């Protein structure tokens, strides 16, 4: 869930130019660009004095507040996030890639075929199949497939099928390939966003999918 970070500034806080730039959104700064010729010379950024009060750090680019999503899109995002966290709980990281395949398929299956989010269902199904094939092609000769069962903070979850482990020596290489699959899926979802009235919702789903790359980079 994206959150705004609220910081309290001391009274009469004077900001340096670098901090002023960081707090001033880039699109607004571009408005100051002049239309005529500019004579090179020093630029003196004005000092900004902030009275006591809250400073709102801008929301990260591309994130969408949960309350701006449709209930269906929020459920898809939540399902992807829960699946990612669950796969991160696995003690043996060799099973994570096939776990993500299983969880993305679980999220896809929860989307009705006739839904306006059918493109998201198709994208998640493709990512799941690609990750499954990747795990199968690099399957461990020593770690056997099995149902993953974890309990965390009172939450119990099982994989929907036996998960295959990737050969430990190949884990870095296979993880890099899995990241490519995840990023491709995120791009597909963004294309769906550009062609849909549900742009904000598809963008949020894409961001949730791309968050799996953080887990894969940690393997």
Image (cartoon, rainbow, N blue to C red):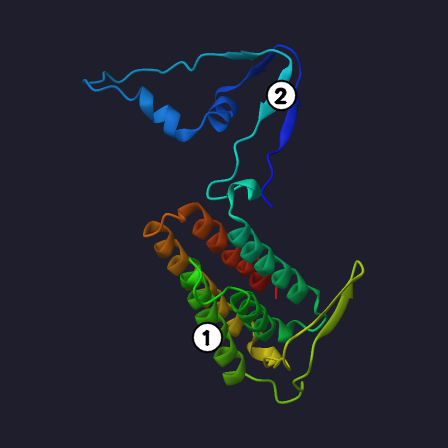
Whether 163 is drawn above or below 198: the answer is below
Mark 1 closeness class: few <14, some 14–19, many ≥20 residues within 10 Å? some
Mark sitting earlier along the chain (2/1): 2
Q: How many marks?
A: 2
Name the spot of residue 107 as percent of width and height, x first: 55, 65
Name the spot of residue 89 as percent of width and height, x first: 70, 65
Residue at 33% over, 26% down: 30
Horizontal relation, residue 45 to residue 159: left or right: left
Residue at 53% over, 60% down: 213
Mark 2 closeness class: few <14, some 14–19, many ≥20 residues within 10 Å? few
Question: Which quadrant is home to the C terminus?
Answer: bottom right
Query: Looking at this view, is 160 or 169 the one in front?
Result: 160
Residue at 29% over, 22% down: 33
Answer yes or no: do the residues labelled 2 and 1 have beta carbons within 8 Å? no
Q: Report how far apart the C-alphas of labels 2 and 1 lie in the structure.
A: 47 Å
Query: Looking at this view, is 192 or 31 the one in front?
Result: 192
In the orientation shown, which residue stands out farthest toward the front?
114
Horizontal relation, residue 31 to residue 169: left or right: left
Name the spot of residue 2 as percent of width and height, x first: 58, 42
Which quadrant of the structure image shows residue 190? bottom left
In the orientation shown, which residue stands out farthest toward the bottom?
141
Residue at 49% over, 69% down: 178
Whether 160 is drawn above or below 187: the answer is below
Reading the image, the residue beneath label 2 is: 54
Find numbered disc 1 in the image and state the secondary structure of the residue it sits on.
Answer: helix
Horizontal relation, residue 14 to residue 17: left or right: right
- Which mark is drawn over residue 130? 1
Find numbered disc 2 in the image and state the secondary structure of the residue it sits on.
Answer: strand
- Which mark is drawn over residue 143? none
């Amino acid at each position: 869930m994206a959150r705004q970070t609220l910081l309290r500034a001391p009274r009469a806080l004077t900001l340096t130019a670098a901090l002023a730039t960081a707090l001033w959104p880039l699109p607004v700064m571009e408005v100051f660009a002049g239309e005529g010729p500019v004579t090179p010379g020093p630029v003196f950024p004005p000092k900004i004095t902030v009275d006591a009060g809250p400073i709102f750090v801008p929301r990260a680019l591309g994130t969408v507040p949960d309350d701006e999503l449709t209930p269906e899109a929020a459920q898809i995002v939540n399902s992807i996030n829960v699946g990612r966290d669950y796969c991160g709980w696995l003690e043996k990281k060799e099973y994570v890639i096939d776990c993500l395949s299983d969880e993305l398929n679980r999220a896809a299956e929860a989307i009705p075929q006739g839904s306006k989010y059918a493109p998201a269902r198709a994208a998640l199904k493709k990512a799941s199949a690609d990750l499954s094939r990747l795990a199968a092609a690099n399957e461990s000769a020593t770690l056997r497939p099995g149902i993953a069962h974890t309990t965390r903070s009172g939450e119990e979850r099982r994989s929907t099928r036996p998960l295959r482990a990737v050969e430990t020596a190949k884990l870095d290489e296979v993880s890099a390939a899995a990241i490519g699959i995840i990023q491709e899926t995120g791009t597909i979802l963004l294309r769906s966003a550009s062609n849909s009235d549900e742009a904000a919702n598809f963008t949020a789903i894409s961001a949730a999918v791309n968050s799996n790359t953080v887990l894969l980079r940690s393997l």
